[in-house]
C-alpha cells in the first residue's frame, strides 16, 4: 500500500501523522504572503468559528493550528496561545503561527480592528440578522453573537429603559 500523501510504500494509509496532517491541507495562492509563504488552509473538519481539528495517532484531537505549531515549531509553553500572524483561522502554515501571552493576543486583535465598536454593536442589534449570520460576518463565535444579541455582552450599547 502507498501513503496517500507522500506515496511511499508502507503498511498503513499514511506513513506518519505529519503525512496525514499535510494531506488535509491546501495552499491558497490568493492569500497574502507572510514570511514568503501563502496560507496553508485546513481542508478537514472546521468548527463553527473556522478552526480546524486534527486527530493524530495517539487519538488526541487538537486544534489543527496548535498541532502544526507543536509539531513543526516546538512545544507551546504553558499559558501561551497560538496566534495566526495571517489572521486566517483555517491556516495551519507553521510559518504563520506564533506563541503569545493572552494579553499580547488581545492587543494584536485590537490592533487589527477585530474588536467591535459601540456603533457596530448598535447597528447589529438594530438589524434583523441572526446570530449565525453575525458570527460569520464579524468573525466571532456563535456563542458570542448570541450573547451580544441577548445583551449579555456590550451592555453599554443596550437601549436605555425609561
Image (spheres, rainbow, N blue to C red):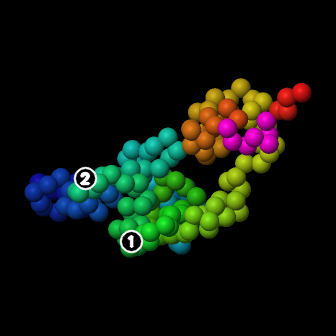
Expressed as whole percent of the image width and height from the top left, the position of residue 29 reads 51, 58
Q: Residue 4, which numbered label?
A: none
Q: Is residue 142 left or right of residue 122?
A: left
Question: What is the magenta range?
Answer: 152-158
Above or below 41: residue 71: below
155 in the magenta segment: yes
**In terms of secondary structure, where does tag 1 sit?**
loop
- Distance from label 2 to label 1 (Cα)? 18 Å
> Badge 1: few (under 14), some or many (20 or more) residues near its Cα, within 10 Å?
few
Which residue is at 68% across, 33% downward? 149
Q: Residue at x 33, y 52 (%)?
A: 61
Label number found at residue 59: 2
Residue farthest along the right direction in this orientation: 162
**Closer to the camera in the image, 12 or 54:** 54
x, y percent for residue 28: 49, 56
Res. 7 visible in picture: no
Image coordinates for residue 74, horizontal then vertical, percent: 38, 73
Residue at the far front in the pictured view:
162
Left or right: residue 60 versus residue 89 is left
> In the rendered image, which quarter contains the N terminus?
bottom left
Residue positioned 10% across, 57% down in the render: 11
Asked if the magenta segment contains residue 93, the reply would be: no
Identify residue for label 1.
75
Q: Which of disc 1 and disc 2 is earlier in sequence? A: 2
Observer-nearest of 43 and 78: 78
User: Above or below — where is 65 with respect to 133?
Assistant: below
The quarter holding residue 121 reads top right
Amino acid at each position: 500500500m502507498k501513503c496517500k500523501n507522500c506515496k511511499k510504500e508502507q503498511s498503513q494509509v499514511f506513513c506518519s501523522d505529519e503525512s496525514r496532517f499535510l494531506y488535509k491541507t491546501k495552499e491558497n495562492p490568493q492569500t497574502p504572503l507572510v514570511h514568503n509563504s501563502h496560507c496553508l488552509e485546513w481542508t478537514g473538519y472546521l468548527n463553527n468559528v473556522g478552526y480546524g481539528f486534527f486527530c493524530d495517532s495517539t487519538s488526541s484531537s487538537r486544534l489543527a493550528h496548535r498541532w502544526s505549531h507543536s509539531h513543526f515549531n516546538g512545544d507551546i509553553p504553558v499559558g501561551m496561545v497560538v496566534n495566526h500572524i495571517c489572521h486566517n483561522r483555517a491556516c495551519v502554515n507553521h510559518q504563520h503561527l506564533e506563541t503569545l501571552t493572552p494579553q499580547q493576543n488581545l492587543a494584536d486583535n485590537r490592533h487589527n480592528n477585530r474588536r467591535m465598536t459601540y456603533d457596530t454593536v448598535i447597528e447589529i442589534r438594530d438589524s434583523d440578522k441572526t446570530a449565525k449570520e453575525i458570527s460569520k460576518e464579524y468573525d466571532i463565535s456563535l456563542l458570542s453573537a448570541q450573547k451580544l444579541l441577548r445583551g449579555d455582552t456590550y451592555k453599554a450599547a443596550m437601549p436605555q429603559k425609561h
